Image (cartoon, rainbow, N blue to C red):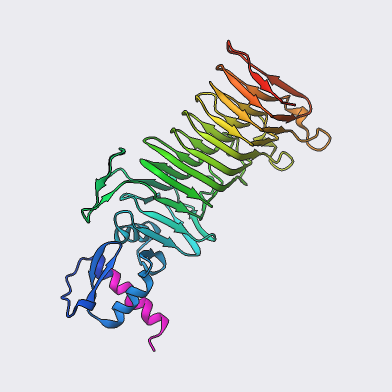
């Protein structure tokens, strides 16, 4: 017969007990509860029931975490979740004036599809959200966690969420990771990068994400900025960013990725735009990627392989591409590019095949 408000009140009080590390004497074995591998003692039966009901899946719900601001709430939720724990972020708007730091102990975060992390008018920081588990070494060997069990630093994740930095910085930064997954995220209006994946770190799978810019005055921004190796990217979309995909490192795989600009509404982003900028990388494989209405569709690097990729530029009688010059499909300033089954449909197109010493190999391309 306890009301929802009463349960929420008790639940918050229970978290305060945990976060303040106040010792509460257990009166029976049923007073002991394990959440994410940690033992909590809550003697009041109503408080105990509320705490158990909200954490029965082992995940900490941000809705029941109080704090003076958004950064404090995420920080407290992460501390309670603990090493490799999971924080759930429900629907709502979470405004912040500074970077929200996540994952210091490898925690994962599951955002509702309509949970918005938004830069406030006073935001003045590099990134809206930054995930980095610098507390642990990145190595292949497992290491013991707080329970004395072997636990490799893998399988942490960020799922969902809308990150809107309002043209004031970057949306999301990921660094110091191993075996990570990001899916279902939206990156809005970045001045620098929609998402930046940086060293140290490797083995990221980034997929089913959407990056869109609806602000003027952000020319030079990048939707997906990749600065580390051995990662996989698939089913990603970039709209009205100066560069869709920039890859600095080697041995990455991009599949079904699609950058495009809407010239009619955002003509400032077409000049000097690049769909895929992988000129400084080695051994990158692009499969079924599609660049639409970018001034340079593919700027390739050393030993790049493109399979079934497409380039399209909108008709000149619809959008005035001729005002900006021809469209370059391949700008190979390194050497060794293989194109298999690619289709380039661009009016007024210049194909810069090679400026290195090895010719581009084309098999079944039109």
Q: Nearer the viewer, residue 270 or 291?
A: 291
Q: Is residue 160 left or right of residue 10?
A: right
Instruction: List x then y, in percent, for residue 218.
Output: 58, 39
Query: Is 142 situated left or right of 362 in this image?
Result: left
Instruction: Write down the quadrant of residue 64 in the picture.
Output: bottom left
Q: Looking at the picture, tell me which residue is in the foreground, 332 or 188.
A: 332
Considering only vertical position in the picture, is 273 above or below 183? above
Residue extending farthest to the right is 317
Question: Where the C terminus falls, by quadrant?
Answer: top right
What span is colored magenta in the figure? 1-15
User: Magenta span: helix, strand or loop, mainly?
Assistant: helix
Instruction: Return the x and y of residue 311 as percentages of the image width and height.
Output: 70, 32
Q: Residue shown at 53%/29% (left/top)?
A: 284
Asked whether residue 169 is in view, the answer is no
Q: Is residue 138 magenta?
A: no
Displayed quadrant of residue 313: top right
| Residue closer to the observer: 237 or 74 | 237
Is any atom of residue 326 visible in this view?
yes
Of residues 249 and 241, which is closer to you in this image? 249
- Residue visible at 53% across and 32% down in the picture: 246
Q: Is residue 6 magenta?
A: yes
Q: How many numbered marks have been drawn onto this rendered protein structure?
A: 0
Picture residue at 37% right of the left edge, 42% below the top: 177
Q: Is residue 136 left or right of residue 28?
A: right
- Left or right: 32 as drawn, with respect to 9: left
Q: Position of residue 222 (x, y in %)?
A: 55, 37
The part of the image, by quadrant, that contains residue 54 is bottom left
Q: Residue furthest bottom?
A: 1
* The N terminus: image quadrant: bottom left
- Residue at horizontal 22 percent and vertical 77 percent from the top: 31
Tell me if residue 130 comes above or below residue 113 in the rendering. Answer: above
């Amino acid at each position: 017969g306890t009301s929802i408000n009463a349960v929420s009140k008790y639940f918050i009080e229970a978290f305060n007990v945990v976060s303040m590390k106040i010792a509460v004497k257990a009166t029976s074995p049923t007073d002991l509860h394990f959440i994410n591998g940690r033992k909590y003692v809550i003697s009041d039966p109503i408080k105990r029931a509320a705490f158990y009901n909200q954490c029965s899946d082992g995940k900490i719900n941000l809705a029941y975490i109080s704090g003076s601001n958004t950064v404090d709430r995420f920080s407290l939720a992460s501390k309670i979740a603990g090493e490799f724990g999971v924080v759930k972020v429900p629907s709502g708007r979470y405004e912040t004036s500074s970077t929200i730091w996540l994952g210091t102990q490898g925690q994962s975060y599951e955002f509702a599809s309509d949970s918005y992390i938004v830069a406030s008018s006073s935001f003045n920081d590099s990134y809206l959200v930054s995930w980095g588990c610098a507390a642990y070494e990145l190595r292949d060997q497992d290491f013991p966690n707080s329970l004395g069990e072997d636990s490799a630093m893998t399988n942490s994740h960020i799922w969902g969420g809308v990150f809107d930095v309002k043209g004031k910085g970057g949306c999301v930064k990921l660094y110091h990771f191993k075996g990570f997954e990001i899916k279902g995220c939206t990156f809005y209006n970045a001045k620098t990068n929609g998402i930046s994946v940086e060293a140290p770190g490797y083995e990221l799978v980034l997929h089913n994400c959407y990056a869109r810019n609806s602000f003027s005055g952000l020319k030079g921004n990048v939707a997906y900025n990749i600065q580390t190796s051995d990662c996989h990217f698939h089913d990603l979309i970039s709209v009205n960013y100066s560069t869709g995909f920039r890859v600095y490192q080697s041995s990455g795989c991009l599949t079904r990725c699609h950058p495009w600009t809407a010239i009619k509404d955002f003509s400032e982003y077409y000049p000097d735009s690049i769909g895929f900028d992988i000129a400084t990388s080695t051994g990158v494989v692009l499969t079924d990627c599609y660049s639409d209405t970018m001034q340079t569709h593919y700027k390739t690097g050393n030993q790049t392989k493109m399979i079934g990729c497409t380039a399209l530029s909108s008709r000149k009688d619809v959008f005035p591409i001729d005002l900006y010059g021809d469209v370059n499909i391949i700008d190979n300033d390194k050497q060794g590019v293989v194109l298999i089954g690619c289709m380039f449909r661009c009016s007024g197109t210049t194909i810069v095949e090679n400026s290195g010493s090895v010719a581009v190999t084309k098999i079944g391309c039109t």
